[in-house]
Amino acid sequence: MEKPHPDETSLTILITGGAGFLGNAIVMELLDEDGLIPVKEIRIMDLRAPDIQGDTRIQYIQGDIKDYDQVEKAVQGSDIVFHAAAIVDWGTHSEKEVYEVNYQGTENVIRACKAANVGILVYTSSLDAVFTGSPLVDIDETQPYPEVHPNMYCESKALSEQAIVHANSSTLKTCVLRPSDVYGEGDPYHIDSLMAMVKNGFYVRLGNGKSKCQHVYVGNMAHAHILAARHLLNNNTSLEGEIYFITDGPGHNFFSFFDQIIEKSGHTIWPRNLWLPRWIAYSIGSLSEAIAFILRPIKHYNPKFSRFAVVYTCTDFTFSSAKASKDFDFSPKYSQQEAIERTVKHYRSQ
């Protein structure tokens, strides 16, 4: 695809959740000297300030995605909105909070984009929108939503996808990107928790090591966002109102994939080959949830070791990015070798 001409009008871009794991990567890719979108201003809307400092094009807007007035103020004057703000949840937040942030927050963004005449809205969804709890092998974007979702996170992502698709119009062009498990430098969802486990001296894997899932490096996921927005800018109608899986390599076992990063980062995994059978892990998850339920009148908390976490890491869930490759030329900017090297370098310094 052609890059923008030097005299092409620079754009104002809003990233909700821009201080988060993926949001930060989108900012970094936009600022890259070979970026595909000419940047005048990058607005980061988040509850906390971003780590990126020193670039005059970055404006931090402290705001809550649940507050429409704050969203409307942040959106005003934006040409492109990347909506990445969300609670990524495996059962540690209340259903009400997940619904309000993920779905109602998305409704606020759509409404504000329409009011401000924003031209392009790219939404960060999740493969969990179609997760059923049963194996899904080599599926594509025609996979239907389940009749009943395993939890509110999955349901909120499916509802948000449908709202984004429905919002597509001649004046507001939208598309949905579904990442596989995102990893990379500063990964708060997978690597950080596994690092904590190995540092505590007892490393436990779930299942039998045979189930496979997809992964994507955070830099490649950010690159996919920028490519999608660039194609929408160029009036590529193929993307409008469409949903895309994004991954950058073949399926791997969840734990085996991350083991290599843990070990290359200089840590010794012990016990070396301890795999907790799925039925035992599931029973522990049930017990953990039961204890949380009993204690709820005294102390409200949601257990991190849940039945959903067990099912998710022990169930086949594979697909490809063929549709994204066809419609907007997606291909990984970073090879898997480079992605792992960059990730390992970050964790070696921790």
Image (cartoon, rainbow, N blue to C red):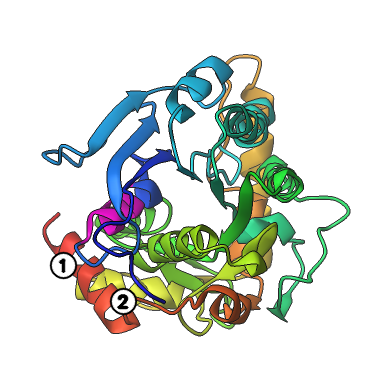
Task: Tell me which segment is drawn in magenta.
Answer: 24-32
Badge 2 is on which residue?
A: 334
Whichever of callouts 2 and 1 sits on the residue coming sooner in the sequence is 2
Q: Nearer the viewer, residue 164 or 246?
A: 164
Can you tell which quarter of the image residue 268 is in? bottom left
Name the chief secondary structure element in magenta: helix
Neighbor class of circle 2 (other Cα within 10 Å; few <14, some 14-19, many 20+) is some
Can you give x and y, in whole percent of width and height, for residue 237 in the image?
Answer: 65, 65
Badge 1 is on which residue?
A: 345
Secondary element at tag 1 = helix
Residue 77, placed above or below residue 207 = above
Can you give x and y, in whole percent of width and height, for residue 244 in the image?
Answer: 62, 67
- Quadrant where the image shows the N terminus: bottom left
Q: Is residue 132 magenta?
A: no
Q: Nearer the viewer, mark 2 or mark 1?
A: 2
The residue positioned 70% from the left and 57% from the top of the image is: 241
Neighbor class of circle 1 (other Cα within 10 Å; few <14, some 14-19, many 20+) is some
